Image (cartoon, rainbow, N blue to C red):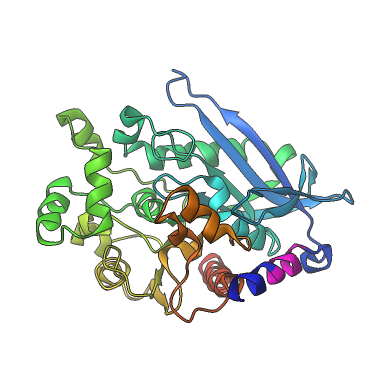
Amino acid sequence: MKTVLGFLLSICFSLPAFAGETPIGFRTSPLVDKQNDRPLELAVWYPATTTATPQLIGDTPVFVGDPVVRDALPAKGAHPLVVLSHGYRGNWGNQSWLASALVRQGYIVAAVNHPGTTTRNRDPEAAAQLWQRPVDLQRAIDAVMAQPAKFGTVAVGKIAVAGHSLGGWTALEIAGARFDAERFVQDCIAHPQLASCNVYKQINPDRSPASKARLDDDLRDKRVTAIVTLDLGLSRGMTNASLAALPVPTLVIAAGAPSEDLPAQLESADLAKRLPQATSRYVEIEDASHFSFLSMCKPGALALLEEDAPGDGVICRDGDNARPRALIQQQIASQITEFLAQSFHN
């Protein structure tokens, strides 16, 4: 019943009337670097000027899609920019629901698929270059700012990064937090059950002295003036000093549903305690699971996932006695837009 209700609510969210006077434009384009050794797929959602009929993107047998108008003309005026970073083995489509909600509030939203740690590219060599993730976001910011005719004009001083899971680590890095590989490895001896430790072993980013040195680098982009982490991982490897001195406002949102491998108290809540109290905010959503931050699942999706790969149905499960995922995500989007409005105003 909950799944059906969530699907019905998703239809309501998709109706043109809900979008009000802000049609959602959408474009994808390749980003090729000078050496062409780390090509990216850039996706951008933006306020548009169009009367065209929207089409669904991200619509799969499992996930509910989002209505957009491809290649629409951008709306006039300057808009804040939010860059999204997906989790381990995720993709930019996972938070399309959030991108759409932000565009309705006047934001431009960009995202990339991080090579090596995305659904479509699990190359181990690319994955080991974990330090490249913040650089990927810098390239996305560069591309959006350089093409106002395609995406709209980015407002001066109003750029934020929001990341889910490993994307939350990416957001911290681009904001100026510093990762200590030795600290993280030692912490995993004490907490081997954490999903972050298993992911780190799979990625193996400190496999060589050169890679480890890059991982320890300062990867801050000073254009980023606020960040949001969504049930992040790997935060226990961040140094206390860099978190205490983090120069941008930070919203930490945690999944409050009980979890052995991603407990809020050892990840998001632990992070929040080490951030500057004056410029950070912690929100724990009691009935959200780690996967509540992904797109809404269609009726029957859980059974479909379990049939294909037993255990994968967790992707469509929220916390026990949870509200429909649509309502959980409405709360998440509201928290983010309120936080960003306050951060950018200051």
The rendered magenta stretch, by its main secondary structure, is classed as helix
Badge count: 0
Q: Is residue 10 magenta?
A: yes
Q: Residue furthest front?
A: 307
Vertical placement of residue 26 versus 319, above or below: above
Q: Residue furthest right?
A: 51
Q: Is residue 276 magenta?
A: no
Question: Taking the image as drawn, is residue 226 in sight?
Answer: no
Vertical placement of residue 64 versus 284, above or below: above
For image coordinates 33% across by 52% down, the residue present is 176
Q: Residue furthest top?
A: 35
**Splitting the image into 4 quarters, where does residue 18 fall?**
bottom right
x then y, percent, for residue 315: 47, 59
x then y, percent, for residue 226: 46, 60
What segment carries the magenta color?
A: 8-14
**Splitting the image into 4 quarters, where does residue 3 fall?**
bottom right
Q: Nearer the viewer, residue 124 or 307?
A: 307
Quarter the N terminus occupies: bottom right
Q: Nearer the viewer, residue 55 or 6?
A: 6
Question: Taking the image as drawn, is residue 104 in sight?
Answer: yes
Q: Is residue 285 left or right of residue 329?
A: left
x then y, percent, for residue 193: 20, 60
x then y, percent, for residue 336: 53, 68
Q: Nearer the viewer, residue 328 or 209?
A: 328
Q: Is residue 327 left or right of residue 40?
A: right
Vertical placement of residue 318 versus 113, above or below: below
Vertical placement of residue 291 versus 134, above or below: below
